[in-house]
Image (cartoon, rainbow, N blue to C red):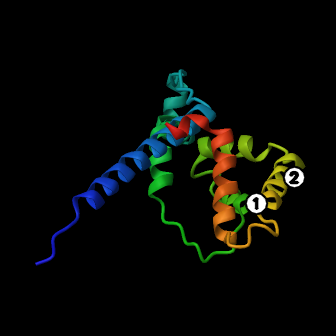
Amino acid sequence: MVTKDPRKQYRRATFQKRLMDVVTRTRDLVTKLMPSAIPSTTQPTSSQKSNLIAKLYHSVSDQANSTSTSSEISRYLSEYYDPSTNESVEEYWKRKRFEYPGLYSAALFVFSIVPCEAMCETTFSTASFLLDKTRTRLLYKRVEMVVLGSQIATKFPHWLD
């Protein structure tokens, strides 16, 4: 009979809790970046009620306004992702702009940030400091983890809590 190690179960539960915390923080951040939904305040007049095209327009516009940001994020998170596609991030958001209009505007905001060379230069100087002739036993994968971890810790120190 095989018994399960309780330490492993505790680690798994702790990891799951931290993962859910990160997902919640990310959802809150994306929700702040998304534009708030503006409800439709116009009421149709009697002449519009007789017009079938106006009725169709109002029913479609009411459905578009009723989509909340949290349901949009939930639909996005539950969507299947195929890692074998060669689609770029820009192509993906161009294709999904009508399905996720709020997330599309948040993606436009995030991707409009101009990259600079400072982060790249810092990364290479940190890696060159770690990988020199005296540190021959240090694996490249370990150096990659150290550099990435230091960048994340610098940018998001509250995640280390």
Front residue of 98/34: it is: 34
Residue drawn at x 52%, y 26% is 39
Q: Quadrant of residue 83?
A: bottom right
| Circle 2: residue type | Glu
Residue 48 in percent (x, y) is at 54, 29
Q: Earlier in the sequence, mark 2 or mark 1?
A: 2
Q: Determine which of the numbered discs, if any, sits on residue 121 in the image.
A: 2
- With 14 as the anchor, is 45 left or right in this view? right
Asked if 20 appears above or below 79 in the picture, the reply is above
Residue nearer the viewer, 43 or 21 = 21
Residue count near mark 2 (Cα–Cα under 10 Å), binned few <14, some 14–19, many ≥20: few
Residue 50 seen in this snapshot: yes
**Left or right: where does residue 149 sit relative to residue 80?**
right
List the single residue furthest toward the front.
134
Residue 98 pos. (x, y %): 62, 51
Q: Quadrant of residue 7?
A: bottom left
Which quadrant of the rendered structure holds the N terminus?
Answer: bottom left
Report whether 28 appears left or right of 91: left
Residue 149 in the image: state x and y as whole percent.
Answer: 63, 52
- The kind of residue on which mark 1 rests is Leu
Q: Is residue 58 visible?
A: no
Q: Residue at x 48, y 53 (%)?
A: 77
Q: From the viewer's perspective, is the residue at label 2 or at label 1 nearer?
A: 1
